[in-house]
Image (spheres, rainbow, N blue to C red):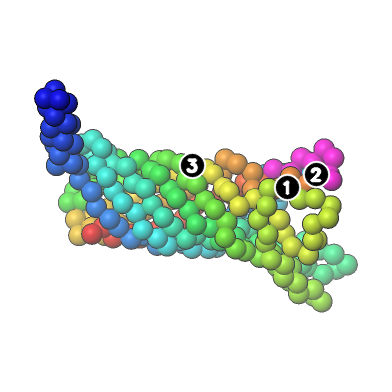
């Protein structure tokens, strides 16, 4: 019993010591996204999409893990997608797809002192979950909007008046920026999607579709 109490006291002292040495802060971040959807279609042809402008806004925490190194988890609302044009019967039709996600970035940040502030260099994974979206076709006599429905597999009996995507997205972040002495920061963000966002169509044989989110953006933040 005495040994158990001693072990508990030692663990409590160790935990208090770790907490005392650990720094934590919270921050807000918002900015603009320049997103695309890259990959190939059902026939294996490369997609020819153009960049779509979106935005992101959210919060994060910053937890010290070593001198000048921090773990930075966050929670963002972010919009992604792509656009492209095609010509049919002499009319130019613009396709635009907008996807809204709740995103959880899990970054490691290196913050060496530079001048009166800190350089920001970071990387890490992100996990995102689609919550809404739509696809629009506009041009000439065409003006059509279809909602996005999130599911992993599409069958022949599913409705054909919606656009299907997987809800779960996973990828990698890269970050470079600067934090001023007043806790205001600016950074460049880059993302590379590592998982397909297109569902499986069980009625299409030899489907080679592989669509992934990619993009970059600029954001401003403030730490408390």
Q: Is residue 207 magenta?
A: yes
Could you say which quadrant of the image residue 71 lies in? Answer: top left
Does residue 92 lie above or below 167 as drawn? below
Question: Which residues lie in the magenta part?
Answer: 202-210
Q: Is residue 101 left or right of 71 when viewed as pictured?
A: right
Per the picture, the main secondary structure of the magenta-coloured stretch is loop
Q: CA distance from mark 2 to mark 1?
A: 7 Å
Please say whether residue 139 is one of the residues in the magenta stretch: no
Tell whether label 1 touches label 2 (CB within 8 Å): yes
Secondary structure type for disc 3: strand
- Residue appearing at x 15%, y 39% in the figure: 16
Q: At numbered mark 1, what does the secondary structure look like: helix, strand or loop?
A: strand
Q: Residues within 10 Å of mark 2 (few under 14, many from 20)?
A: few
Disc nearest the viewer among 2 and 3: 2
The residue carrying mark 1 is: 153
Asked whether residue 174 appears in the rendered view, the answer is no
The residue sitting at 71% across, 56% down in the picture is: 164
Residue 134, horizontal then vertical, whole percent: 66, 65
Residue under numbered circle 2: 202
Q: Residue furthest bottom?
A: 141
* Residue 177 location (% of width, % of height): 34, 50
Image point (72%, 67%), residue name: 146
Q: Give the crowd class for mark 1: few <14, some 14-19, many >=20 residues within 10 Å.
A: some
């Amino acid at each position: 019993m005495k040994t158990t109490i001693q072990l508990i006291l030692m663990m409590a002292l160790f935990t208090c010591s770790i907490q005392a040495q650990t720094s934590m802060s919270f921050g807000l971040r918002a900015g603009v996204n320049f997103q695309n959807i890259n990959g190939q279609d059902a026939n294996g042809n490369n997609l020819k999409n153009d960049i779509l402008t979106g935005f992101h806004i959210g919060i994060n925490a910053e937890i010290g893990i070593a001198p000048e190194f921090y773990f930075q988890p966050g929670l963002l609302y972010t919009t992604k997608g792509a656009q492209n044009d095609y010509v049919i019967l002499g009319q130019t039709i613009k396709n635009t797809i907008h996807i809204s996600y709740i995103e959880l970035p899990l970054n490691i940040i290196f913050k060496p002192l530079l001048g009166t502030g800190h350089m920001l260099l970071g990387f890490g994974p992100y996990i995102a979950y689609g919550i809404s979206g739509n696809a629009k076709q506009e041009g000439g006599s065409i003006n059509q909007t279809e909602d996005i429905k999130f599911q992993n597999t599409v069958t022949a009996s599913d409705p054909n008046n919606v656009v299907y995507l997987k809800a779960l997205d996973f990828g990698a972040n890269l970050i470079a920026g600067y934090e001023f002495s007043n806790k205001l920061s600016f950074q460049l963000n880059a993302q590379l999607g590592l998982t397909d966002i297109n569902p499986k169509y069980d009625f299409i044989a030899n489907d080679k579709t592989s669509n992934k989110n990619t993009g970059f953006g600029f954001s401003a933040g403030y730490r408390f």
